Image (spheres, grey):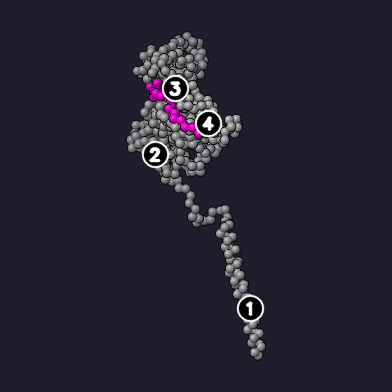
Amino acid sequence: MKNFRNIVFTFALVVAGAFLAVWSYTKFFNDPEVITIKETQPMKYASLPAGSKTVLPDLTYAAEKSVHAVVHIMTQQVRGGWSGGNPLLDFFGNYHRQEPQIARGFGSGVIISDDGYIVTNNHVIDGAQKIKVVLNDKRAFDAQLVGTDPTTDVALLKIDAEDLPYLAYGNSNSLRLGEWVLAVGNPFNLTSTVTAGIVSAKARNIGINKDRLSIESFIQTDAAVNPGNSGGALVNQRGELVGINSAIASRTGSYSGYSFAVPVSIVKKVVNDLKEFGEVQRALLGVNIADVTAEIVEEYGMDKIEGVFVGGVTETGAAREAGIKEGDVIIAVEGNKVNSTAELQEAISQFRPGEDVTIVVKRNNSKKQFTVTLRNKHGDTQIVRDQLSVLGAEFEEISKRDKERLNINSGIRVVKLNEGKLNDAGIKEGFIITSVNKNQVYEVNDFKQVVNNSRGGILVEGVYPNGEPAYFVFGVN
């Protein structure tokens, strides 16, 4: 009996020990291995479960704020000619004013002050004789054109109104790739339309502006923009204006994935100049530039790809005067790095002629710093004034039929004369200007560009509607 109890007791100890060993192994060896896998490699389904606490960007504040400050712009251009409908009678001067043809255009604009200043694209109002602005609350105003800058595709309008909702300027330089933005405008005449997207790229040069001195440093986004959006607002999540929507990349004419906006860093400078001088004070370095490529790095023995390559300097330019040479690489402007021609143009565009700018270049792989006094398009540091304001005239383009009748291939018509240099020179209403200083004039912007780039005397040549040729000479400052 005693032996039996000893056997049972021993068996119980063995069983208990076995259970204790299994429990210990499970507790101290199995569990840590499972926990470690869960913590270091969490596996989740790609779908978003209901009730998820993931926070999406809230764009409602920006949309509500900006939609009231974006306006609908309608333009009207009257096209007509001097014709009797009979080529033989026209030849002998028996002409009359034919029934005018009206061309209409549409776009968007952004109110930037409570007293009625509105910024839009130059191409929205280019050539328009009448500009109407319709606010989000349906009020309509005739707009005055304060000034334009074709080189940046920016124009400034003014309406006679007060206490208007407006957008404050944001900082386009601080925009980050992937940041959410809104495009607000009037695509296809659908007023007050808001679309959203992200900043896809910055400092894009897409070659859309053919002006010789054009500045292209677009903000690229994937916010949907269509015809009619031009001149509308690109705003950040705080409802601040960071760009003016201007172009789309499209093979069809409608939105295909990417849109482009003029950064507000450029817009602010243009607006301030137009308000103060009526003409943009364009500052120039006086250099021929190109992006640095692998080929340039190899040819010039550079240590890495960075900056903007100086392919040449103008004889009387600001850069040459400061000591910058052909073959230098500009890497910074006022302490801010530049790595493309678009970035350099945008940086310089924020200054006026006569201002000093610190430029850092690399020469033979060593850094050098220069202080450059920027110059204007005439090669000096004076303020450039809008010469058209002193001419005292309004113009329109002439029809193809008039060109054929008068045997000319260019020209703009003087439709109204006020006090000014054209009136003083003896020019009469109806006179067709075909060339200025031997430069042919095809549209009003051609005339404006030649006059504004001229110093001293101006030679205007053209014909009257009866075919009589004439020329006039007058001076400008």
Task: Name the front one of labels 4 and 3.
Answer: 4
CA distance for labels 1 and 3: 103 Å
Range of residues picked out in magenta: 367-389
Q: Secondary structure at mark 2?
A: loop
Q: Is residue 55 left or right of residue 7?
A: left
Q: Which residue is mark 3?
A: 379
10 Å crowding of disc 1: few (<14), some (14-19), many (20+):
few
Closer to us: 209 or 424: 209
Residue ID at (39%, 15%) = 475
Q: Is residue 57 left or right of residue 47?
A: left
Q: Which residue is mark 2?
A: 168
CB-based contact (under 8 Å), mark 3 and mark 2: no
- Point out the tag, 4 or 1, that comes first from the N-terminus: 1
Closer to us: 320 or 473: 320
Closer to us: 434 or 297: 297
- Point out the tag, 1 or 3, that comes first from the N-terminus: 1
Q: Amino acid at mark 3?
A: Gly
Residue 143: in sight, yes or no?
A: no
Q: Residue furthest bottom?
A: 1
Relative height, residue 464 to residue 125 (above, below): above
Q: Secondary structure at mark 3?
A: loop
CB-based contact (under 8 Å), mark 1 and mark 2: no
Q: The C terminus lies in which quarter of the figure?
A: top left
Relative height, residue 17 to residue 64 (above, below): below
CA distance for labels 1 and 2: 81 Å
- Point out the tag, 2 or 4, that comes first from the N-terminus: 2
- Point out the tag, 1 or 2, that comes first from the N-terminus: 1
Q: Which residue is mark 4?
A: 363
Q: Which residue is mark 1?
A: 15
